[in-house]
Image (cartoon, helix red, strand yellow):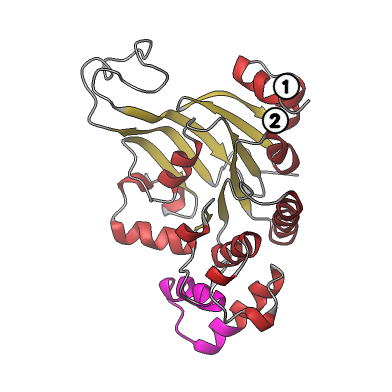
Amino acid sequence: MVRDVENPILTVRNLSKRFGLGCRQCQSGPTSHLDKNYCQNCGTVYACAEVSFDLYANEVLGIVGESGSGKSTLLRCLYFDEEPSGGEVYLSAYHHGEKNVVLASSQQKRYIRNHTLGMVYQNPVLGLKMNFSAIGNIAEKLIAAGTRHVADMEGRGHELLQHVSIPLARIKETPKSFSGGMQQRVQIAKALSNNPPILLLDEITTGLDLSVQASVLDLIKEIRRSTHISMLIVSHDLAVIRMMADRTIVMLDGAIVEAGVTDQILEDPQHWHTQQLVYSLL
């Protein structure tokens, strides 16, 4: 894969997210007094602690870590489901990467969600309207992006649902009648509806049977081959990251503890937490 290392399409610098007001103790600087990422004095949780990374065109970046490491919170901050407590995020598609999207207006953030980013959640209930039909979910995303032509929406919906192997005879059924794997496929189709340059994937194989996991991952690999889309893939499972990611960042207690080419991290992990994750594969 060839990428433009001078011009990332997504730049994240010192992104932080805390749940709680914080106190003098936990905001004083060094975090040695914290219990992992939790302040016992005021109860504040530091879910993300000054996270920085770049994502390049045509790249898959894996984000791995144990439950509670902050990786899903990071994705929710990037998709504006959560408001970061601090830091900067730049998108090449937004003012040529020169303006911090964290400071963008609500209207600008909606535009970015509808045109620049696609999101696939671990729980399909968060990404789908369960009482809308499968094709209706795609139409909803297209309408949010400004599409008004019914025939165009129907054509795009048919194309996408067929691409993710949803039988056309079932496209007017609601996702609540689908299996977990089919719901994830509809989510993926919806996320791709406006051809976003960046796809965010949050633990999308968790809870699925192994055969269904494999089919979902095969679909994602096929989407990458056919669209050259950039992806951020969050998982606690390093086997998924090994299969999918070009580079990987490892998170623990809200911070990045290791980053590098995926093969390098797998073959020669430096941080003890990464070593534990790698050894769990053996």
Residue 224, quarter of the rendered image: bottom right
Q: For label 1, count other residues whose C-alpha is less than 10 Å away and answer few (under 14), some (14-19) or many (20+).
A: few
Left or right of 67? Residue 268 is right
248 and 183: which is toward the camera: 183
Q: Residue at x 56, y 69 (%)?
A: 193
Compared to residue 266, the image places residue 1 above or below, namely below
Mark 1 sits on what residue? 279
Question: Which residues make up the magenta segment?
Answer: 133-154
Instruction: Report whether residue 96 is seen.
Output: yes
x, y percentage for residue 185?
63, 63
Q: Amino acid at mark 2?
A: Val
Q: Position of residue 45 (x, y in %)?
A: 34, 28
* Callout 2: SS: strand
Q: How many marks?
A: 2
| Front residue (pair 47, 124) | 124
Q: Position of residue 21 (x, y in %)?
A: 22, 30
Above or below, comparing residue 203 to residue 257 in the picture: below
Residue bearing mark 2: 261
Are circles 1 and 2 on residues that touch, CB within 8 Å?
A: no
Q: Is residue 142 magenta?
A: yes
Main SS category, magenta section: helix
